[in-house]
Amino acid sequence: MLNYFGAVCSSSLSLIFIVFIIGVVGYLLGAVSVKGISLGTAGVLVIALCYGVLIHYFPSFKIGEKNIVLWSPALKNNFSVVSSIGTALFVTAVGLIAGPKFFRTFNKSSIAYLVMGIVVIGLGVATAIICVKLDSNLNANMAAGLLTGGLTSTPGFSAAKEAVEGAAQDEISAGYGIAYLYGVLGVVLFVQIVPKILKTDMAKERESFVAAGSVTIPEPKGKLVKADEFGFFPFFLAVAFGCLIGAIKIPIGHDAYFSLGNSGGTLIGGLIIGHFMHIGKLDCRVSKQTLNFMRELGLVLFLIGAGVPGGVNFVSNVKVSYFIYGAIMTTVPMIVGYVIARYVFKLSIFNNLGSITGGMTSTPALGTLIATAGTDEVSAAYAATYPLALVSIVLGSKILVMLF
């Protein structure tokens, strides 16, 4: 009987089962609201991290003679694929949503978003350097991991690892895992708490925000042909095109290269396809329903794929002082960046928070901000800030490990 049950259990604990059961419990947790503040989709991340902690202590167990494996190097790679697919779906959807208006509304005031991308990351790097200088037990490799984890930047994390070898790479990985939890939840909560502290009239702010961002989008001339009913053709095209863009390597020094990676590339791909809306007679417009679905599905897959390994790494490497440093590297750029965006660039609260999520390269926070603001128009500020922030964190993380 135990052997039979073990065989059934082994089938149930497949990767597909794990991904979807984490989603089920995560959405239940995210639905819990305390004084109007909830985790929303980020509840999935909390459950994914908890599962990661669980399998760190119990990577396998036996039922009868059957060995049930919950964690292995192969599973780690599978979760990495889940995360990558989720990122591609989410970021491409954001690009396609923002694309029709992004280039048509880009003007001198849009420079503020570009500057914000540099400012937020610059503040994070400066905070990391200060922490290294103040604590002799904190080296640059660990600080780079904490910084990229605190800013939830996989490209920055990868760039830092490429700049070093051996044990130094393990330190960067450890730091990333320690800071990642607060890096996600900190920004997710920040975009919900700030409007409440400021007692923002969300309905009024949303009305003025949408009106200010209104722009006439020309309809494509001539009769267009749809390749499919749901808009999967243009969506998949944007993903594939974006991956090609992300694969381009730009030399930035001796044996050093920069690339946007799949996350940055798919964002650009989505913006371009969304802007032109057609290729010859082929209709490349995607319905709002399809984009919203892809965005949410991508976000959930990203949170699960990144959260489970993050939970394993967190337990393996956690140290209270390092966790605090990581939290500081998340909080300082977020708060100071908000103040600069509000008082220097005079951005509205939605554009302000949109630029902060882009500057922090925080995919989950944008999802939360869209739900909080009640409009996906905030994606434009994220899309405008994200690319330069991505470039900045890649360069900043490399500078940190190479010079300090």
Image: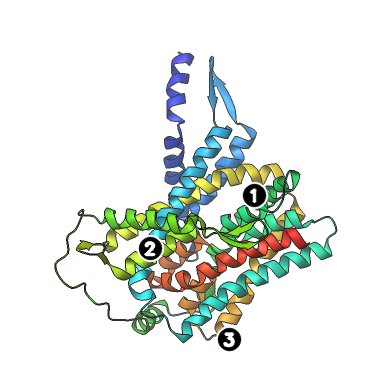
Residue type at the position of mark 2: Gly
Q: Nearer the viewer, residue 289 or 76?
A: 76
Q: Residues within 10 Å of mark 2 (few under 14, many from 20)?
A: many
Q: Nearer the viewer, residue 243 or 105?
A: 243
Q: Residues within 10 Å of mark 1 (few under 14, many from 20)?
A: many
* Disc 2 element: helix
Instruction: Find residue 252 and report its image quarter.
Output: bottom right
Residue 273 place in picture, x, y as percent: 33, 64
Q: In the shown orientation, is residue 24 left or right of residue 331?
A: left
Residue type at the position of mark 1: Gly
Contact (CB < 8 A) between labels 1 and 3? Answer: no
Tell me the distance, in whole angstroms, between the alpha carbons under discs 1 and 2.
29 Å
* Label placed on residue 38: none
**Which of label 1 and label 2 is nearer to you?**
2
Q: Residues within 10 Å of mark 3 (few under 14, many from 20)?
A: few
Residue 367 place in picture, x, y as percent: 44, 62
Which of pointers 1 and 2 lies earlier in the amino acid sequence?
1
Q: In the shown orientation, is residue 70 left or right of residue 228?
A: right
Q: Which residue is mark 1?
A: 177
Q: Is residue 27 above or below residue 73?
A: below
Q: In the shown orientation, is residue 330 left or right of residue 88?
A: right
* Label placed on residue 343: 3
Taking the spot 47% from the left edge, 81% from the top edge, the residue there is 110
* Label placed on residue 270: 2
* Disc 1 element: helix
Which of pointers 2 and 3 lies earlier in the amino acid sequence?
2
Contact (CB < 8 A) between labels 2 and 3? Answer: no
Residue type at the position of mark 3: Tyr
